[in-house]
Amino acid sequence: MFKKVLVSEDMDDINKGIYNTLKELGVQQIVQVQYCDDAYLKIKKAILDNEPYELLITDLSFKSDHRAQRFTSGDMLLKSIKQEYPDLKAIVYSVEDRLQRVRTLIQDYKVNAYVCKSRRGLVELTKAIQAILIHKTYLSPEVNNALKPKNNLEIEDFDIKLLKQLSLGLSQEEISNYFKERHISPSSLSSIEKRLNKLRIQFKANNAIHLVSIVKDLGLI
Amino acid sequence: MFKKVLVSEDMDDINKGIYNTLKELGVQQIVQVQYCDDAYLKIKKAILDNEPYELLITDLSFKSDHRAQRFTSGDMLLKSIKQEYPDLKAIVYSVEDRLQRVRTLIQDYKVNAYVCKSRRGLVELTKAIQAILIHKTYLSPEVNNALKPKNNLEIEDFDIKLLKQLSLGLSQEEISNYFKERHISPSSLSSIEKRLNKLRIQFKANNAIHLVSIVKDLGLI
DNA sequence: TGAAGTCTTACGGAATTCCGTAAGTTTTTT
DNA sequence: AAAAAACTTACGGAATTCCGTAAGACTTCA
């Protein structure tokens, strides 16, 4: 378990929750700040003192007040920190769930986990920490599909249905009608084509026959 | 076991073998004739006497001699007999192994078994009799595929190769070239098409995709 | 809200498959 | 050796699939 953790979060009550969670996880040294600038300075200082933080947990949005700040948001803090100290693990803990923002943080800033503040937020935070301990990134369920569309195969239930009917000998037009009858969307011939084309690319199949052959071997249908 | 059996066969030594075999099987009454005409008359007579034969075993080819005959071959005899008395069981016991002739006898004349005279001919004959007793038709191994091409799968090595390449994503034209390179015949696009069409019909597949799906499920490829 | 992105649908042309017909070859049968 | 059957190949048109473009609806983003 991490020994020294920095928490950057301006809301007192939330800070309390995080603190308790970290204590329960066995974190010995927990430092909390309410401004991003403070977080930045503490991280710098700790490194100079040769007692670096192992993990940063930060919110994204901070209420602005009379104090003028260099970093007004968690994004900016993370960008700088991760550039200077790529090895420092970082978790975003925020209500923000816009997928593109999540994507930027994970892919560009190399944040290690993204946890949405929600009813189960602290549980998710625990999972995130445990994931990072074994060098994995973690996304709470609300934003779990932020990365998938780009990289991975996002084989939906729909795709399985589609491939299944295809393997049963229906033509693309018949599948279209089949879906229309059952009010499964999308159902147009054009969409069927498009989806199959996507699947062909994903599975590196030369044609529909090859595609069905591959997914049968994979046990998908 | 059959009680009353008629054997129509013009070679003495073979007659002897059949006789012994039938005796061993427990057939009580065995009548042997050397002309098809005699066989026909005996069958007629027995029915009139209300003591009909239960089984006819006949050769196909008979040496012609001075006696003019109405039926010069077993085929003709069987055709007439089966037309008049469809219930009388009949076994052809012949050296003939041309598949088409076998097919005609079984499918058109409704002969119950076809046994090739060979080294193991009498063993096969025994099997045939036992099969007929449980109302099954029997074909000795030499001609066992006489019926299969029509009904069943006569899946050749070629077909497997073809289906395999198809499942690997090659177009029919690519398969054609693939076969040409490897001197596998037939290799023309037209032949590939024709063969696949035959396979589709055999496996009741709607299209090539369906076909590959089916043969994969069957474990053929 | 306006802009950007995604999803669904439509359309058209090229490529491929599907299917019947038929000619030329080879094998089988008589 | 001639006839019949089966096999291979070719050809042409219809149907289907493949593939790029694009418009309209909806969602997400700033």
Image (spheres, coloured by chain):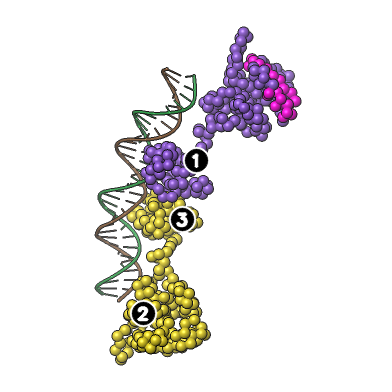
Chain colours: A purple, B yellow, C brown, D green
> 10 Å neighbourhood of mark 3: few (<14), some, or many (≥20)?
some
Residue A53 in the image: state x and y as whole percent: 70, 23
Q: Judging from the image, what secondary structure is the residue with disc 2 in?
A: loop
Q: Mark 2 vs mark 1: same chain?
A: no
Q: Quadrant of residue B7?
A: bottom left
Q: Magenta span covers which residues? A: A17-37
Q: Is residue B192 above or below residue A6?
A: below
Look at discs 3 and 2 and give the one toward the viewer.
Answer: 2
| Image position of A176 with respect to B126: above or below | above
The residue under the point 58% across, 32% down is A141
Q: Secondary structure at mark 3?
A: helix
* Sooner in the amino-acid sequence: mark 3 or mark 2: 2
Q: In the rendered structure, find residue B85 and report the number of the disc placed on it.
A: 2
For the residue carrying disc 1, how many other residues have a C-alpha within 10 Å: few (<14), some (14-19), or many (20+)? Answer: few
Give, as a three-letter code, the residue at label 2: Tyr
Camera-nearest residue between A113 and B112: B112
- How far apart marks 2 and 1 lie (CA) works out to 62 Å
Q: Chain of mark 2?
A: B
Q: Amino acid at mark 1?
A: Asp
Label 3, on which residue?
Answer: B215
- Seen as rendered, the residue at the extreme front is B50
Which residue is disc 1 drawn over? A157
- Dividing the picture into quarters, in which one does residue A15 lie? top right
> Is residue B31 highlighted in magenta?
no
Q: Which mark is in front, 2 or 1? A: 2
Q: Chain of mark 3?
A: B
Up the image or down, A220 lies above or below A70; here it is below
Inspect this view and state whether residue B175 appears. no
